[in-house]
Image (tube, rainbow, N blue to C red):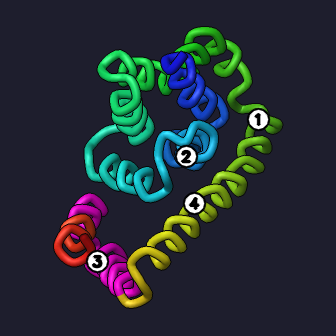
Amino acid sequence: MIYWELFLAFFIPGILGYGGGPASIPLIENEVVDRYGWMNLNEFSEVLALGNALPGPIATKMAGYIGYQQAGVLGGFVGVFATVAPSLILMIALLSFLYKYKESPKVKRMTNFIRPVIAVLLGVMAFNFFFTSYKDTGTWQTLILIIVSFFLLEKWKVHPAFVIIGAMGYGALFLS
């Protein structure tokens, strides 16, 4: 039963997460944290940070980790397969159809309507992470991390992976 639940937990976000990994993260969070209760929000945010720090697609890394955590090696395989299966199925079954209508104004208009929804989902997820961080670590720690991260990313153009690793190190030293 756990393999079926793992499959559904990552297959459904793979179908609905139009726009790739960042679009499917809130959907994965809903499945893993809210629906199945495999993790709490703090654990999920740590897995997300770890997944962001490593190279490659984030959704597959998260699926592999969570699947392995819940059901071992086979669970990790099921999670990764479920994440890539929707894209694989669509590429095989609908490639000629999509190629034929890729310049259609209706398809382009649909894409323009979907982008704001993804932005709102990512904003809600960021707010939830901020609120959890604020509640668990306090105002000053949260503000320090936000301000330092902002300057590193926006002013000094440090790669996000280094900022995440630095924040993880800060948390390990000062927040644990």
Classed neighbour count for the residue bearing mark 2: other residues with Cα under 10 Å, few (<14), some (14–19), many (≥20): some
Residue type indicated by callout 1: Val
Give whichever of 127, 158 is nearer the camera.
127
Residue type indicated by callout 2: Val
Q: CA distance from mark 1 to mark 4?
A: 27 Å
Which numbered mark, 1 or 3, is in the foreground of this view? 3
Q: Which residues are magenta?
A: 141-166
Residue that mark 2 sits on: 33
Q: Is residue 18 visible?
A: no
In magenta segment, residue 172? no
Please determine whether, in this image, residue 172 is positioned above or below residue 114.
below
Which numbered mark, 1 or 4, is in the foreground of this view? 4
Give the x, y percent position of residue 150. 37, 79
Q: Earlier in the sequence, mark 2 or mark 1?
A: 2
Q: Secondary structure at mark 2?
A: helix
Q: Earlier in the sequence, mark 2 or mark 4?
A: 2
Q: Is residue 89 left or right of residue 144?
A: right
Residue that mark 4 sits on: 125
Q: CA distance from mark 1 to mark 3?
A: 38 Å
Q: Secondary structure at mark 4?
A: helix
Give whichever of 123, 101 is nearer the camera.
123
